[in-house]
Image: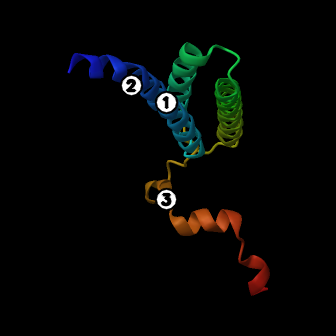
Amino acid sequence: GDEDEGAGRGPGKEGERTLRADYAAQMHDLAILQFDLRNIRAARKLLAQAITIRTDMFGPHDPLTMMSVRWLERVNLWHSRQVGVDVKLKTVLQTAIMMMKKEGKDVNDDGTLRERPMQRVVSDSDMSSLFYSDDEEEE
């Protein structure tokens, strides 16, 4: 009875460590998947948890921990660049709206014209015509 429990404690503890290590590795993989889906907050959280678990278990110089740290840096870098891009796009949009107002057009803050409320919603065909112009083929 009691002796068996004592004997089983060692491997049990080791088994638990293995489970925690596996868990951290899965979190790392899941974080990369979340990053691919651009779920930045989820990716950061998972990487932080994986790093915490592995640092606790193996210390800061564990290769997998360092890999998670590099991924976290990559996610943060991508995110800060993306925020920068969004800010640039907003600036471009604001400049365009100012120009349109100078030309005397009645423009909403999002760049849409007020005269034709029906066209405020951009349809898929409008969207595709921005990218694929049919004009060349018809001429």
SS at badge 1: helix
Bin the neighbour count of mark 3 within 10 Å (Cα to Cα): few under 14, some 14-19, many 20 and up: few
Q: Earlier in the sequence, mark 1 or mark 3?
A: 1
Question: Can you tell which quarter of the image residue 48 is in?
Answer: top right
State the residue position of label 2.
12
The amino acid sitting under disc 2 is: Gly
Where is residue 52? Give x, y as percent: 54, 17
Distance between the alpha carbons at the discs numbered 2 and 3:
67 Å
Q: Nearer the viewer, residue 61 or 83?
A: 61
In front: 37, or 90?
Answer: 37
- Residue 131 screen position, x and y as percent: 69, 64
Tell me the number on the disc at residue 18.
1
User: Which residue does the image show at 35% across and 24% down from the upper left?
Assistant: 8
User: Helix, strand or loop at disc 2?
Assistant: helix
Which quarter of the figure has residue 125?
A: bottom right
Q: Is residue 25 left or right of residue 82?
A: left
Distance from Cα at disc 2 to Cα at disc 1:
10 Å
Element at label 3: helix
Q: Amino acid at mark 1?
A: Thr
Mark nearest the camera among 2 and 3 is 2
Residue 119: mark in rendering? 3
Instruction: Check the image and report above or below for 77 versus 117.
Output: above
Q: Within the image, what quadrant is residue 73 found in?
A: top right
Camera-nearest label, 2 or 1:
2
In percent of the image, x 59 and y 62: which residue is there? 127
